[in-house]
Amino acid sequence: MSFVEYLASRWDNLLETSVEHAEVVLLSLAIAALIGVTLGVLTYRRPAAAQTVLAVASAVLTIPSFALFGLLIPVLGLGYTPTVVALSAYAVLSILRNTIVGLRSVDPAVTESAKGMGFSNWQQLTKIELPLAWPVILAGIRVSALLILGIAAIAAYVNGPGLGGDIFSGLSRIGGANALNLVLGGVLGIVLLALIFEAAFVLLGRLTTSRGIS
Amino acid sequence: MIRLENLSKTFPGQSEPAVERLSMEIYEGEIVVFVGPSGCGKTTTMKMINRIIEPTSGRIFIEGEDVTQADPDKLRRRIGYVIQQIGLFPHMTIADNIATVPRMLGWDKKRISERIDELLETVGIEKSYRGRYPKELSGGQRQRIGVARALAADPPIMLMDEPFGAVDPINRERLQDEFLRLQSEIKKTIVFVTHDIDEAIKMGDRIAILRDRSAIAQYDTPERILTDPADAYVEDFIGSGASLKRLSLSRVRDIEMADWPVARLSNSHDVVREKLRRSGKEYVLLLDGQERPKRWVGADDVALDSVPLASAGWPAVAIVEESSSLYDTLDTMITSYKGSAIVVDERSRYLGVVDFERVLAAIETMRPHNEGQPARGGA
Ligand SMILES: Nc1ncnc2c1ncn2[C@@H]1O[C@H](COP(=O)(O)OP(=O)(O)O)[C@@H](O)[C@H]1O
Ligand SMILES: [Mg+2]
């Protein structure tokens, strides 16, 4: 079967796996954003604390993905949970780093005038600092999204969801019938997802960034 | 209105205080200017009033109430705050920037919207700017919006830290003039920080000249500071030309004007000639139907009936309003041909004429009266 014939006969299956893949990436991204932004907010005014959390998040990223998934098996077993945990862990660093950089780059005159007008610390953060840092934070989320779109394929190693399943089974019986098509289909799915994510981030950026700072 | 009592601030990790035991009273409805060299503690002192900087010791009273321990956020909503870098919120429109404090205070939408329009008009910015963002404004416009935002909830007190420091000299003059005009209507209690003594003299109802650690060298009206500096430090700070600066404080309306012979453009040549003859002056001033000065004419100019009065002699220039400072008046006179200036009211109607002798006489009365007396201490 040629690749085109393969796609024609299996497209519904491929679509379903792609959606699964996108879902697990989005969920992990949401968790990582929550952790990264929260840690960023808590540490951006405390240089020592910021250094520490950034060092930890960087260290996580240096663990080879196979190793991390493997290490999670005894703790979390197989399937969905270890996938989400590992992907979230990888996604934290650039979100955290960009949150800290973004919050620190807010003009001190702006925060001082906000304070002088009677904003509480919470109001200052939510109405002034986070909206101003948002384009930088969103850029961090985007970088993480692309990173874990690829890594998510490795999740097949722990029986995780997504396009990795096709790639792995194709690779394991290379030379056999349809083996190459399975691999190509999985890779194509990931590349297309990456393009869709990119477009979505551009759109989201436009919709959520004030005209005053774009 | 605002009373500072033994206010001190020592920043963490510093051995010397930035402000040391400062006590002063700031009166209601006045602009009080803190002026002094860079680093003397002006900003620190001002920021202790709204507790952006917490005092190390001492107390702050506003309208008799001790606010040293009050909720700082609530305190700040009662105090307008303008800083040199303005700090407009770049992600919010001009309207939203101005609406900030009214929203926090829970005003309803309609009232906020009306207030925005009113303030834009007050600071001379068109209503069409409501939806624009700060980056779309010029420096002067941003400064005006900064003032409008600080005034939004009509706070009785304003703190302004070098508010016009970042604009070019021409715009600064204009902003100062506009602000003084505005203040004459709104009569806020204002603490105004500057390092520029000329700005202090222009803006202040009262000036506190500060030295290191916000120690008050002299706290007095601009007139008193210029005519009667407390000590060598103040004299030095005022610099040369104190008398000339004094001239910028007096208005033409404060000095005696000469009554010059006038006639009308509608008069006959005979009437004008008769006026000239009886006054004994070389020239008379011709006014139009709205009492506005138009031309100077002498005997030779009206000798021929065939020359209409409207084109006889030479045009009346060197005109000043009665609210002009003596400084500007003198400037006008020096550049005028006749060495005198015509004074008009705000509708350009003739009031009188001032000449060098009268301005010099006014300067004479400004001379310090206390020569030989010991210098006074701080207020
Ligand atoms: N946040 C701060 N931390 C430490 N020192 C400060 C701080 N702010 C001001 N100072 C010091 O306090 C002194 C007075 O500063 P400031 O009030 O800003 O002076 P001015 O406004 O008159 O120029 C200066 O010596 C300055 O270095
Ligand atoms: Mg200062």
Image (cartoon, coloured by chain):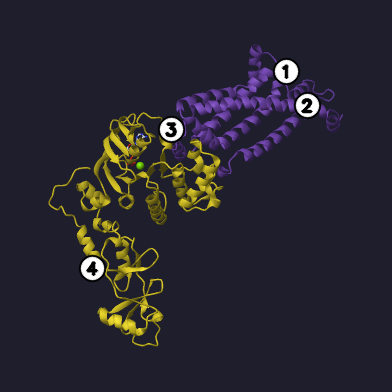
Chain colours: A purple, B yellow
Quadrant of the frame with the N terminus of chain B: top left
Q: Which residue appears at 30% of the width and 37% of the height?
A: B3
Q: Which residue is mark 1?
A: A159
Q: Nearer the viewer, mark 1 or mark 2?
A: 2
Q: Nearer the viewer, mark 4 or mark 1?
A: 4
Chain hosting mark 2? A
Label 2 near label 4: C-beta < 8 Å?
Answer: no
Q: Position of residue B178 (x, y in %)?
A: 41, 54
User: What's the amino acid at mark 4?
Assistant: Glu
Neighbour tally class for label 3: few under 14, some 14-19, many 20 plus, Cα within 10 Å: some
User: What's the amino acid at mark 1?
Assistant: Asn
Question: Mark 4 to mark 2: distance in Å?
Answer: 98 Å
Chain hosting mark 3? B
The residue at the far left in this view is B372
Question: Mark 4 to mark 1: distance in Å?
Answer: 102 Å
Q: Which residue is mark 4?
A: B357
Neighbour tally class for label 2: few under 14, some 14-19, many 20 plus, Cα within 10 Å: few
**Eyeballing the image, is B257 above or below B56?**
below
Neighbour tally class for label 4: few under 14, some 14-19, many 20 plus, Cα within 10 Å: few
**Visible residue check, residue A180:** no
Q: Secondary structure at mark 2?
A: helix
Q: Nearer the viewer, residue A49 or B236?
A: B236
Q: Nearer the viewer, mark 4 or mark 2?
A: 4
**Eyeballing the image, is A89 above or below B166?**
above
Q: Which residue is mark 2?
A: A16
Dot 3 and dot 1 within a common chain: no
Dot 4 and dot 3 within a common chain: yes
Q: Which residue is mark 3?
A: B73
Q: Nearer the viewer, mark 3 or mark 1?
A: 3
Q: Secondary structure at mark 4?
A: helix
**Visible residue check, residue B103:** yes
